[in-house]
Amino acid sequence: MRSFATAARLGRACAVVILAGLALNVALAAPAGAAAEYPTRAITLIVPYPPGGGVDAMARVVAQKMSEALKQQVVVENRGGGGGTIGTRQVARAAPDGYTLLLGHTGTISINPSLYVNLGMDPRKDFDAIGLIASMPVALIAHPSFPAKSIAEFIELARKSPGKLNVGTSALGTGGYMCAELFKSVAGVDVAIIPYKGTAPVMTDLLGGHVPVAFGVLPPALGNIASGNLKAIAVTSLKRSSLLPDVPTFDESGMPGFDAVLHYGLLAPAGTPKEIIDQLNFELRRLADDPEVQQRIHAEGGDPMTSTAAEYTADIDKEEKKWSDLVKKLNLKVD
């Protein structure tokens, strides 16, 4: 009998050891304090711009893979208007429960706070950063009939007709718009910036020849550039785009140091439980190592990025300082 009792005690002890080991493995595999019950239903990922732009493209890459990782659907909703302020404000006022997220973008998070007089929110106070996703340059894109083939020729045309050369961009405060303003300031030229409601209508008018040239993100233009329906003159990053290796940078084109790259990240309403933020950051960083995700981001004209929540917060502050200086210098304001 004693031998059976001893065997039973040993069996229970082994079971405890095995279970402890399994618990340790789980702890190492998941973020500390991850909310085991989250998510239990679909998550809404708000894109504060119309479909077809760079923000929308990044959201759809993330949504698909996060749906698989979280075992719940991540649904992308486009809520455009007000240069990205309407959708962004809506997320700021949403319940901080992890079920409404924002695809953050340099324009809405780092530019709009200093550009808009009555923004109705403070991105630093009203959001909790989750993590960075990608960066993407803007390109100067033209209709094939546009005579300029380089930045130097573009500047020469602009100087011959001050204020008469129309340049299309996405909405006020977006990356494309601010890149156009930065170009005007650095090059010392007077061009008429024509802001549209989104990237897609800019491309439509560019293809139709209604606007000769535009600053825009690459995804909506790549197919038409490849087919010759549009041409890319230069990109705003310090290094060439892997998708357009023959297109020079502004830095290479006589504007040394010109650097205007947009950053994309994931944010939640302020007050979202840290356990949920940590869990989402953990999954987001795992996505950055996924070859398929990397390939899709590159295909959209971007470069994958990853960060902690704190690092994304610091990046927002850094970008806000950079763009607010330009807004103040040019005295730009939107009511």
Image (cartoon, grey):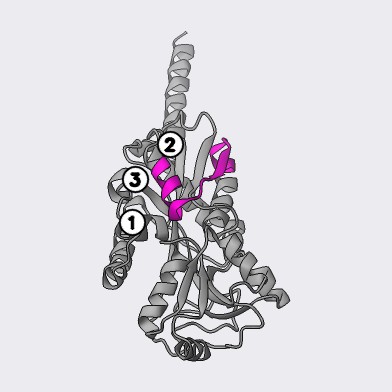
Callout 2 crowding tier (Cα within 10 Å): few <14, some 14–19, many ≥20: many
Q: CA distance from mark 1 to mark 2?
A: 27 Å
Name the residue carrying label 2.
Answer: 98
Element at badge 2? loop
Image height check: is 69 above or below 295? above
| Residue type beneath disc 3 | Phe
Tell me the residue at 49%/81% (across/down). 164
Residue 208, percent from left and from top: 67, 70
Name the mark on residue 127: 3
- Which residue was labeled with disc 1? 116
Mark toward the viewer: 1 or 3: 1
Amino acid, disc 1: Tyr
Residue 69 counted in the magenta span: yes
Q: Nearer the viewer, residue 332 or 65?
A: 332
Identify the mark nearer the N-term, 1 or 2: 2
Residue 147 in view of the camera: yes
Give the residue furthest to the top. 1
Q: Which residues are magenta?
A: 67-90
Q: Is residue 278 visible?
A: no
On the rendered image, what quadrant is the C terminus found in?
bottom left
Rounded to the nearest angstrom, the CA distance separating label 1 from label 3 is 18 Å
Q: At 63% from the left edge and 78% from the top edge, which residue is drawn?
A: 143
Residues 108 and 34: in front is: 108
Which quadrant of the view contains residue 110?
A: bottom left
SS at mark 3 in the image: strand
At x 37%, y 85%, the residue is: 188
Give residue 278's position: percent from left, percent from top: 38, 43
